[in-house]
Image (cartoon, rainbow, N blue to C red):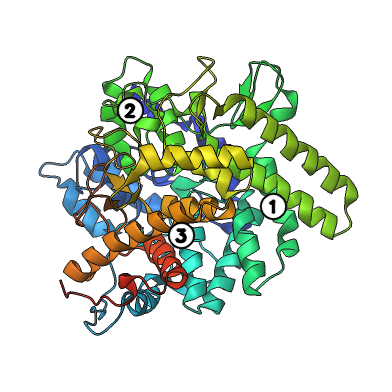
Amino acid sequence: MELQRAVSGEEAPFAEALAKVRGADTLTPADRYQELFVDVQLGKVFPDSKTFVDCAPREHPERILEAYREQRDQPGFDLRAFVLQHFEPFELPAQEFVANPDDTLAQHIDRLWPVLTRRPDRHPGLSSLLPLPHEYVVPGGRFTELYYWDSYFTMLGLDESGQRQLLRSMADNFAYLIDTFGHVPNGNRSYYLTRSQPPVFALMTDLFEETGIRRASDYLPQLRKEYAFWMDGAEVLRPGDSHRRCVRLPCGAVLNRYWDDRDTPREESYREDIETAAESERPAHQVYRDLRAGAESGWDFSSRWQADPTRLSTIRTTAILPVDLNSFLYRLERQIARLGEARGLERCAAEFRERAAARQAAIERYLWNDAIGAYFDYDWVLGEPRENLTAATVTPLFVRLAGEQQAARVAEVIRSRLLAPGGLATTEIGGSGQQWDRPNGWAPLQWMAVRGLQQYGEQRLAAEIERRWLVIVSDLFERESKLMEKYVLRTHAEHAGGGEYPLQDGFGWTNGVTRKLLQEDPQHYANRCRAGRC
C-alpha cells in the first residue's frame, strides 16, 4: 500500500501544471515510469538510487513503459537488461585531465573549472535534467547538475580564477530558474522541483555587483519572487499554525522552516528512504517529508534534525526553525529593502525594512541562547530551543544580523567548543553516521565562519579557522592530487565518511572556497604545495 501511494496519481496535477512551464519536461522519473520506476529502485538494478533517475531514455518514455508492461511477465524477463536496452546511464565524459605535479593548488583549481562545466546543448532529451539557457558548473562526482547553495560558494572561486563569463552565465541561469519555476530548485532535475535549498540568491547578487558583471538591482524582481515562494501562506496563519515553509509563533512572529511539497520517498534515494521510514514509529509519509526537508536544508543529513542523534528515522526537520535559514531570509529582506530604495520604490523599501526588523527580533527571542552565548535552532512543535550546538551559529554573523556583544560571545563559544584541528566543526556530535556531523568539516561552513568573524573584528579566530582548513585541504592535495566534497578535521587529512553515498571528489564548493581563501592568505603554505608531493 505504501509503495502504491509513493507513486500514485495524488500529485499528478502538480506535475502536469509544471509540465506546461516553457515547454520543460518536468515529470519526474516516478511520474513517468510508475511501476517500472518502483521495480528498478527496489530491485537494486543500480547500486546508487540516483543512477536510474539520472538516466536518459533511448526512446519516448511512454513507449518504454508500454514495452515494460508487455514484457515483464514473460518467462526469463531480465529487468537489468531491459533497463540498459531502453536507458542510457549517465557516464562521466572521458577527460584527459591529469593533475600536473608542477601546478600549485590555485593553478590546479583553475584547471578544474572546464572539467566541471556543463553546456546546455549537450542535455539529453526527456531525461530528468531541466534545461538551462547558459553553461554552468556542477559539484562533481555523482552530482552532475547545478545545485543552488553550492553554486554561491563555487562562484567565489570562479571570481578569483577570472572566470567572468562563466560567472555571468551562472547569474543568468539562476534568474531564469526563478522566472520559470518561482524559486530556485534544489538542483536542475525534475525530481528536485518540489524543494529549494538555503536561499542565497541575495548573496549572489552582491557578488555579481562586486565583480561588475551585473547590477544587483537588475535582480530585484527575482528576489521578490523568491521571497514570495519562501513566505507563501504566511499572511493567513494564526498563532501556532504552519503552512509550507512558514510558522506563526504564539507571539505572532513568523519564522521559517525547511519543507518539501511532496511526502513520498525521494526519487534519488527511494529504497533508502523506504528503509528509513520502516524503522520509525511515525507514519511513513511524515518521515518522507522530513527527509525531503532535510535535503532542502543542504545538511543532508545531520543529528541537527534528529530526535535521537543515532537514528535517522527520528528525523523531524519540519518541526525545527533553523538559525541559518532565518538568517538568510533576513539577508534577503534587507537586500530587497536596499535595492527597492535604490530604485526609488519607497513603499517596497519600507515594507522590507519592517519585515527584516521583525525577523531580527524573532531570531533574538527564539534562536539566541543568552545563557550559552550562541544561536541555536528552535523546536516550534515542542516549544523549546534545540540543545545541539552547530556551525550554523555563525550565520547571523555572516549576514550581519548579530549585535557586537553577541558576535563576541559566539566567537568564544566557537573557540571553546567547535574549533577542530582542521577548522570549524559541523556539530559537537560524533558517531551519528551522518555526514553533517563530527568529525567532518565542510567548505561553506568555513567560509561563513571566516567572513562572519572578520566582519565583527574577530580577526585572530577567523585567521585560525582559515589556516587550519587550508592545512587539511593542502595535505590531502599533496597526497592524492584531489579536492574533496568534505574533510575529516583531524591533524592529518583522511577520507571523510558518513552519509548516503561514497565520498565525492571534484569538488565545486571546496574549489571555490579554497581558491578564495588562498588569495586572502597568500603567505600560507597551501599556496606553495604541489599535487602528489607528500
Instruction: Give the foreground label among 2 and 1.
Output: 1
Residue that mark 1 sits on = 223
Residue that mark 2 sits on = 3
Q: Quadrant of the C terminus?
A: bottom left
Q: At x 78% / y 49%, what residue is drawn?
A: 337
> Does any portion of residue 426 appear in the rendered image?
no
For residue 244, which quarter of the picture? top right
272 vs 405, left or right, is left
Q: Nearer the viewer, residue 525 or 233?
A: 525
Q: Amino acid at mark 2?
A: Leu
- Evaluate if marks 2 and 3 touch, with contact meaning CB atoms under 8 Å apart: no
Instruction: Give the SS element for disc 1.
Output: helix
Instruction: Give the SS element for disc 3.
Output: loop
Q: Which mark is residue 146?
A: 3
Q: Position of residue 217 (x, y in %)?
A: 75, 62
Q: Position of residue 431 (x, y in %)?
A: 22, 33
Which badge, 1 or 3, comes first in the chain's sequence?
A: 3
Q: At x 52% / y 56%, what residue is drawn?
A: 451
Q: Amino acid at mark 1?
A: Leu
Q: Amino acid at mark 3?
A: Leu
- Evaluate if marks 2 and 1 touch, with contact meaning CB atoms under 8 Å apart: no
